[in-house]
Amino acid sequence: MDEQALLGLNPNADADFRQRALAYFEQLKISQDAWQVCAEALAQSIYSDDHIKFFCFQVLEHQVKFKYSELTEVQQQLIRETLITWLQAQMLNPQPEKTFIRNKAAQVFALLFVTEYLTKWPKFFFDILSVVDLNPRGVDMYLRILMAVDAELVDRDVVHTSEASYYFPLTLEARRNTLLKDTMREQCIPSLVESWYQILQNYQYNNSELTCQCLEVVGAYVSWIDLSLIANERFINMLLGHMSVEVLREEACDCLFEIVNKGMDPIDKTKLVESLCQVLQSAGLFSIDQEDDVDFLARFSKLVNGMGQALIASWTKLIKNGDMKSAQDTLQAIEAKVALMLQLLIHEDDDISSNIIGFCYDYLHILKQLSALSDQQKANVEAIMLAVMKKLTYDEEYNFENEGEDEAMFVEYRKQLKLLLDRLAQVSPELLLASVRRVFNTTLQNWQTTRFMEVEVAIRLLYMLAEALPVSHGAHFSGDVTKATALQDMMRTLVTSGVSAYQHTSVTLEFFETVVRYEKFFAVEPQHIPTVLMAFLDHRGLRHTSPKVRSRTAYLFSRFVKSLNKQMNPFIEDVLNRIQDLMELSPPENGYQALLSSDDQLFIYETAGVLIVNSEYSAERKQVLMRNLLTPLMDKFKVLLEKLMMAQDEDRQMALADCLNHAVGFASRTSKAFSNKQTVKQCGCSEVYLDCLQTFLPALSCPLQKEVLRSGVRTFLHRMIICLEEEVLPFIPSASEHMLKDCEAKDLQEFIPLINQITAKFKTQVSPFLQQMFMPLLHAIFEVLLLPAEENDQSAALEKQMLRRSYFAFLQTVTGSGMSEVIANQGAENVERVLFTVIQGAVDYPDPIAQKTCFIILSKLVELWGGKDGPVGFADFVYKHIVPACFLAPLKQTFDLADAQTVLALSECAVTLKTIHLKRGPECIQYLQQEYLPSLQVAPEIIQEFCQALQQPDAKVFKNYLKV
């Protein structure tokens, strides 16, 4: 072997050596006999370096996985012998191999097993067992190999191709795995189970590591072997014995969980679970409060959860089968576990609690189906409710300012608890409402002296009721009087208690979230609006010391104002004055740290727009207010643009361009307040926005930071096309001219939707402009598409594909808006060039989205120009190019009907042929029958069949025919 290259296998080697080692690995993989060198190195223990040994196994792995069938019988035998020799050596070596080498070796054994077991090596396991006997190092390898075999055959985490393929449900691999498992069940599983029993018996008191490994194997195999081999007295007794041995009990727990999880007859399942429970209970394992090992309790909780869910699954099946007697017995068994479930649910460790939630959720689902609840069941529901309320509470350690992994896990756990709360609401909405009301009122009466987590959870529960109690469109304050009164009382308490001043971010945020969630309350009691507005606007909200609170409040404030815009009139000017300083465009130079980020400011601008547009003021007053809002932005923009033109330093250029972009974005955002009922014109604001346009457009000719500036102005133009209607048209030609100057694929791709929007909206009004810019735009597109790119530059290829799609979308918009004259007036040579690009798009590029668009364009052009009075030469083009395209595209190998987009492309292709037949009549049929289809060597009867389908009046008939 190349000793120099092998040096690079060491993780501490420098980059050049590592690169060389990688290249050497690739070289060995393709070499015919390099694997033999590696096999010899392993069999004869030539190398002591762990990384080289691992490397040798990798080469063998590649050989077995991808090239095994190319080997001769003798070579295959050599691989088998190498592995067995290596295994024998394991028991004699003074030191065991590193774990990563043993695992890799086990993988290679497992690959060889799936390849050879059915044919050349039926004694695979017996050969391994005869080598390892009960030698601890040998047993370790044997158990690792068993786990690797299970991973190859059934591991649930690996997406085997049977699941990965939608169209071919059972693939070769899945069929092979089923056959392997069936053969193992017949030939060797009983012997393997016996070997496990021997290993457990032999090592349970003196080698916990091997015992745990063996328990893991039993747990893995139990899901697909005959359960009676494991669920019998001698095995279960041994496992239960392990439950009281500290170093074994976690693995024993998992093993029992797998046994309980195994699918079986519902009555047998109930018996199995019950017998396990009796033994576990008599062993004192149900006394949770005496146990302080949280890792074990987490596994135990998972086991209890499995037993509970298994019993519930049995109950469901028995009810379905109509066996009421057994169902009742099973229900009793479930009820008997509820006390234990509650102990685990309320446990202070969230992992233990989280593991039992599934059982809890399913138990509530049973209660939901019962016609009436017993007193005990009602007490259970209440106990679950109290447990959920307690467990929703933050603990002291939660870090609100710097949330890490632990915090993220608690947030996930809270989501699980929320599902329980929702389920509780389905079982007993009255009880939930009463419990929340009690907790809420008690807490808020003394909020000043209560710990933050309790105040937060009280408000949180009120917030959660909004989703838990079913209503349509948030109408919590009408309909059911009891519920409406309770919620109204709690909301009144929330906004009048002064709790918004609580000095903790979690309480502050929960206050604002809840106020916005129940905005309909303020339609019923509008007198509280000023109180809440002040909370939003002062140090409790938008001016809070925490950036996180300020940011979230900016979003919630915009939602609050939008949803209550009808009640806002008395406060508009006051609010606008109070938020004025929050809307300042913070330029990069003064190092001034603004209270809000530019993203947060977007919400404030939108809120200001909403307040002005929805006010009851006259159009004149609205215009004055809107001008006051936007003039500072325009003034700043002019100054900053001049500074950018002068700036030398690139970082400064970027900072200025970002600031300019924010200014445009803010102005854009204010326009979101307009609607069909309140248009820009009706509000008298057209002039203000036209001034903005005139201010922003010069940025398009700035040679610096083009991408950022163009993107902002383009977005503003999109908004203005919607808001200003035809008043925007005079600005479009010069804006387009600037945007087409030295642009790249991405610029064009983003510019085309703008032109499409104008075309679709204004149609013939923009026909002269489109005719004038049509060829310049196309030249810019073709120029970018023809640029040479690196062969394997994926992103450049993708950009070109997206640009091609945008180009065809543009042609589709032009033809679809009834403006084919835009194309027709470009001169015969240009028209022909455009038509050929569409034919090329339909046939040559394996991109079904573009192909679909191309066929839509072709059928539209045939519809417009394909009649007797169409442009000269077009009929000829139809027969020479469009008809062939309809056949050549579907005949391409890349045309994959298993792909949904391709099916749509085929459908449009059918429409194109139908349209040609519609416009050309019998002449089209004659051409297909006598000239085109015979030239493709199509059999006469198929030609006949095809033409008949094409002539059917119902288009669906032909579409379906073409698919088949």
Image: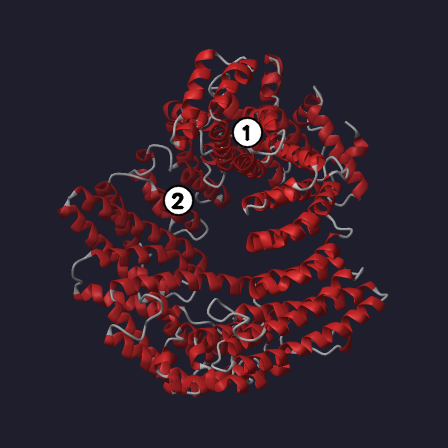
Q: Quadrant of residue 727?
A: bottom right
Q: Dividing the image into 4 quarters, which one contains the C terminus?
A: top left
Q: Relative to 44, is 790 above or below?
A: below
Residue position for label 1:
895
| Residue 127 in sight from this viewpoint | no
Colour scheme = secondary structure
Q: Earlier in the sequence, mark 1 or mark 2?
A: 2
- Front in this rendered view, residue 950 or 276: 950
Residue sitting at x 32%, y 80%: 488
Q: Residue 400's x, y, as percent?
A: 55, 72
Residue 255's disc is 2
Callout 2 amino acid: Cys
Residue at horizontal 21 percent and vertical 66 percent from the top: 378
Q: Position of residue 659 (x, y in %)?
A: 71, 69
Q: Badge 2: how crowded within 10 Å, few (<14), some, or many (20+)?
A: many
Image position of 561 with respect to 74: above or below: below
Q: Amino acid at mark 1?
A: Phe
Snapshot quadrant of residue 368: bottom left
Residue mark closest to the camera, 1 vs 2: 1
Local secondary structure at mark 1 = loop
